[in-house]
Image (cartoon, rainbow, N blue to C red):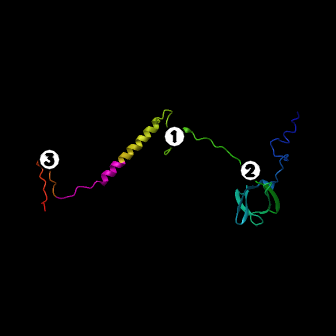
Amino acid sequence: MDLSNLTARSPFAPAGSGRPEAVPAEAAQLEFRSIASDQGGMMFSIFDATANRGHWLRMGEAGFAVVKSYDSAQNQIEVEHQGKIIPLRLKRATIQVGAAMPVQVMAQMPGLPVNKDANGQVAPTDARRLEAVAAEVRRRRALRTVAQTPAPAAGPATTPVPADPSTLVVPVPPVP
């Protein structure tokens, strides 16, 4: 089995692709990033790496550069920039996986669900936090109740109620 040409022609590369073509120096500073379409037609996002700035260009419109043609089958455009025609292929997106957030940090964040163990019991740190919240709610409710109770009106002293209800005299209205 001959593996010498494996580096020149990868079995994982698309059919018909040999070695990657050399990128002209002009093309190295420009990147074809995306395509959008609206009522005015197609728009192409070109990123200028030297200026660190992106530009949206329409087909044939003068500006930073002029898009001369678009090949949808190859995802390639030809751009006239600084008097030169430069072919640009659509840049492939790279997906980068971020690191997972440590569990200890997540447990300290307010507003997260309560952690329970395998038996359904609330974890001790969460139980303390929940008890502190409940105590604060009770305190605020008590303050609100005190603020809503009316102060006694200034006026004649109230009549004391007798201890024995049988001695209480209740006026009876006259019978018509």
Tell me whether the residue at label 3 lies in contact with that at label 1, contact meaning CB atoms closer than 8 angstroms: no
Give the labeled residue for mark 1.
107
Amino acid at dot 1:
Ala
Q: Residue furthest right?
A: 2
| Foreground label between 3 and 2 | 3
Bounds of the magenta segment: 140-155
Disc on the earlier residue, 3 or 1: 1
| For the residues bearing labels 1 and 2, Cβ distance under 8 angstroms | no
Label 3, secondary structure: give it: helix
- Distance (Cα) linking label 1 and label 2: 37 Å
Q: Is residue 3 above or below residue 160?
A: above
Residue 81 at least partly seen: no
Q: Which mark is residue 72?
A: none
Q: Is residue 141 magenta?
A: yes
Q: Number of numbered discs present?
A: 3
Near mark 1 (Cα within 10 A), the count class, few <14, some 14-19 or many ≥20, is some
Which residue is at the front of the view, 22 or 109?
A: 109
The quadrant where residue 69 appears: bottom right
The kind of residue tagged 3 is: Pro
Q: Nearer the viewer, residue 51 or 70?
A: 70
Residue 87 in view of the camera: yes
Q: Residue at x 31, y 54 (%)?
A: 148
At 41% from the left edge and 44% from the top edge, which residue is drawn? 133
| Residue at mark 2 | 92
Q: Give the position of the C terminus as an image quadrant.
A: bottom left
Residue at the farthest front position: 176
Three-letter code, disc 2: Arg
Residue that label 3 marks: 165
Residue 64: in magenta span: no
Distance between mark 3 and mark 1 Cα atoms: 61 Å
